[in-house]
Image (cartoon, rainbow, N blue to C red):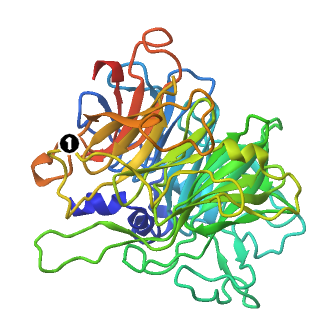
Amino acid sequence: MVTARRIGLLVLIAWMHVGGTCGGGSGGGGSAPVKKVEAPDSRCLALASQFPPGFDLVPNAPGLAIALSFTPGVAEPVDLEPVPPAVAAPGPFVDLRSDIARDACSGFLDPAFAGVLAVAPDLAFVSASSCEGVAFVRSDTGALRSLDVSVPAGFAPGDEPFNPAPGTTESRVALSTRFCVDAAPGAVDSFGAAIPPGCDSARPSFFSNFTSAAALVAGSLFVSTSNLGRNAGRPDTQFLPGSVLVFDLDLTATPPSIGPDPTTPLIFTSGFNPTHVTSYRTPGGRDLVLVTVSGATGLVADDPSTPEREAGGVALTPAAIDVIDAAQRRLIATVPLGLAALSYEELAIDPTGRVAFTGSAIARRLYAVDLAPLDALPTDPSAPVQVLDGSSGPDARIFDAAHPFEVPARPDGAPVATCPGYIVGTAFSAAGDALYATDFCDGTLTLVGVDVSGSPPAPVPGDSSHFQVLRSIPIAAPLDPSSLGLARAPGAVRVRPGIPGVDYHGPDVFFLVGLPEGALCGVRIDSQ
């Protein structure tokens, strides 16, 4: 129970990445086939480990998804049509970590998968921490594939210590995201302390770490690095300045090629702990990267006078949604959201592109921003970063820490002391009239009605005429001692495009569960 909650929080996933899986790359398991495990629920396909780190729907391949497992590090193609979902490739599936570690960190550490971005049936990008990197995987087979990885000639040899030497190209199954970051003048960590010399002994610097997610925007790959510091999994967890790495990508080449952008390989975020990046194109055609800046997050101190081990989260610094112009390679705006501790799945954007939602890693709360003001942001590359809180320009906040959207608790839900609520995943229905949100603790899928029709003002008023709870569906058991052995701890959620019963006949909403075994599950909402 305590372990489940702790792994569910970002800082504990970070602990698992940085401390729990460190060791020689040979620990990746080689190429031994992965043993079959039993599904915890008749709606679910069993995956190879507890707390699977992510899955994604595959573009241009209707009904196909790719799902990850932690240990062993496996990627499995999944057919979404049957109940339960079925493995969509013959296998055998093998642990990919040793081969990834060889190419991303010279076999120094085992990769701990963080998430997956599927871009085509023959390519998905798997982000991994500990051995910091992004691996190249076929979405349709789950096998690694090679891309040409290069580093611009002007880079210093120590800037990218595990990628090819500057000015050279190598065929690899992964690229390294361990980059020597020169801290900006006056930069401080999440404690307010100055950044000391690190990877460069001559100036304030540190190596990027805790690779959290990737987004393909305007032909380039943007990768968020949360840059975890000391005390992971404690109330006083330290974070270094957040960053997004930029990689030039050519998918038309044979083989495809990738490498750090020669002029702007890194963009600093406005706050600490960027946990996801989401692609967004404005109605005017401007390609943007929306960065989920969760803010530094820790755990509340345990109360030794109680028999249970408290495991609630605490927000240490403010959160925000940052806006990066993909073509200009720069931060152009930020939407401050206060001490929200944003969850670290991708943003849910409604089909009209008007609003974006995310959850909270420390409470049953939803946060939302209005995307309409983004089309009017200055295009002048010298324009200052716009703060979209109404203080000196447009306000893009709909729900923030001061005015959150509260998700109802399950009447027979998880004990508050040990699991006080955590909205992991959010996704819009294909029609765009409902938002789905998973609660890790209570095991629920909450449906929120969303109405942004009729061109409402910006920001969309956060009232019941636009947003209201429709119902909460128990899709898994709550995290309490009586639910051992049942499917529990729902996580990421995705919705199939199209009309149920017309474009497909199987489930329309898919979600991960973490316990007692990891699984990918499917439900049909109109039958719940």
Q: Nearer the viewer, residue 24 or 370?
A: 370
508 vs 286: above or below? above
Left or right, 473 with respect to 433, comes to: left
Residue 118: quadrant of the picture? top right
- Where residue 225 sits: x, y (%)? 60, 63
- Where residue 119 sits: x, y (%)? 65, 36
Report the residue at 67% width, 42% height from top.
372
Please rate how many residues cluster around mark 1, counting C-alpha atoms within 10 Å: few if below 14, some from 14 to 19, many from 20. Answer: many
- Where residue 247 sits: x, y (%)? 76, 54
- Where residue 170 sits: x, y (%)? 78, 54
310 vs 134: above or below? below
Q: Which of 380 and 463 is in front in this view?
A: 463
Report the residue at 40% width, 65% height from top.
16
Q: Which amino acid does label 1 sit on?
A: Ala
Q: Quadrant of the N terminus?
A: bottom left
State whether residue 69 appears in this view: yes
State whether residue 92 appears in this view: no
Q: In which quarter of the image is the C terminus?
A: top left
Left or right, 490 with respect to 428, comes to: left
235 vs 118: above or below? below
Per the image, the residue denoted by label 1 is: 477
Left or right, 179 with respect to 211, comes to: right
Q: Is mark 1 on a helix, strand or loop?
A: loop
Report the residue at 24% width, 47% height from top.
409
